[in-house]
Amino acid sequence: MAVTFIQDNQGDKLNINKDGSLNITLSISRIKDYWTDQDNQTRKFQTPQDIVSIMNDADTPLTFTVGTFTITVPPHESFEDAFPAFTILNVNANGPYRGMVKGT
């Protein structure tokens, strides 16, 4: 049996061994920063990070920018996702929110 490749949902190829098993490397994200605030803020990190989580507790939307991505979080909603490695996060808010950054 030849080695077969399949693609995951990120477009990466997964190697399937002859016995049907996969070689998988797991990485664990750890909380690198957590804060609460209600105003605009720029967070700077010494090492690259890759996950942002924002919980908007305000009655107005907030926006945050990571690299070239600007995301709007509606009032009383949350957002979490991975981004290309970043060292600067800008938050524009006019009410209370909670922020968390995770990295490996």
Image: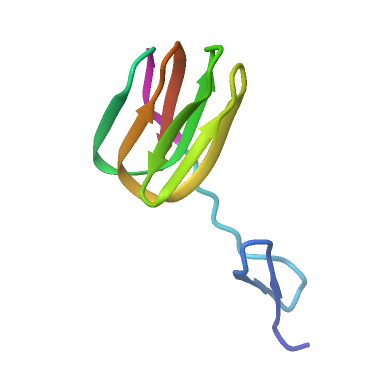
Q: Residue at x 57, y 31 (%)?
A: 79
Nearest the eye: 54 or 65: 65
- Whether 85 is drawn above or below 93: the answer is below
Place of residue 70 in the rendered image (x, y in percent of width and height, measured from the top left): 45, 43
Q: Is residue 9 left or right of residue 35?
A: right
Place of residue 83 in the rendered image (x, y in percent of width and height, measured from the top left): 46, 48
Say which quarter of the image contains residue 44: top left
Q: How many marks?
A: 0
- Whether 45 is drawn above or below 40: the answer is below
Specify the color scheme.
rainbow
Q: Residue at x 36, y 49 (%)?
A: 67
Q: Residue at x 73, y 88 (%)?
A: 2
Give the main secondary structure, helix, strand or loop, of the magenta stretch: strand
Place of residue 8 in the rendered image (x, y in percent of width and height, measured from the top left): 68, 64
The quarter in which the N terminus is drawn is bottom right
Q: Is residue 43 left or right of residue 68?
A: left
Q: Is residue 11 left or right of residue 103?
A: right
Residues drawn in magenta: 30-37
Nearest the eye: 60 or 43: 60
Place of residue 76 in the rendered image (x, y in percent of width and height, measured from the top left): 61, 16
Residue 62 counted in the magenta span: no
- Whether 34 is drawn above or below 2: the answer is above
The quarter in which the C terminus is drawn is top left
Q: Residue at x 33, y 47 (%)?
A: 86
**Residue extending farthest left:** 46
- Whether 28 is drawn above or below 24: the answer is above
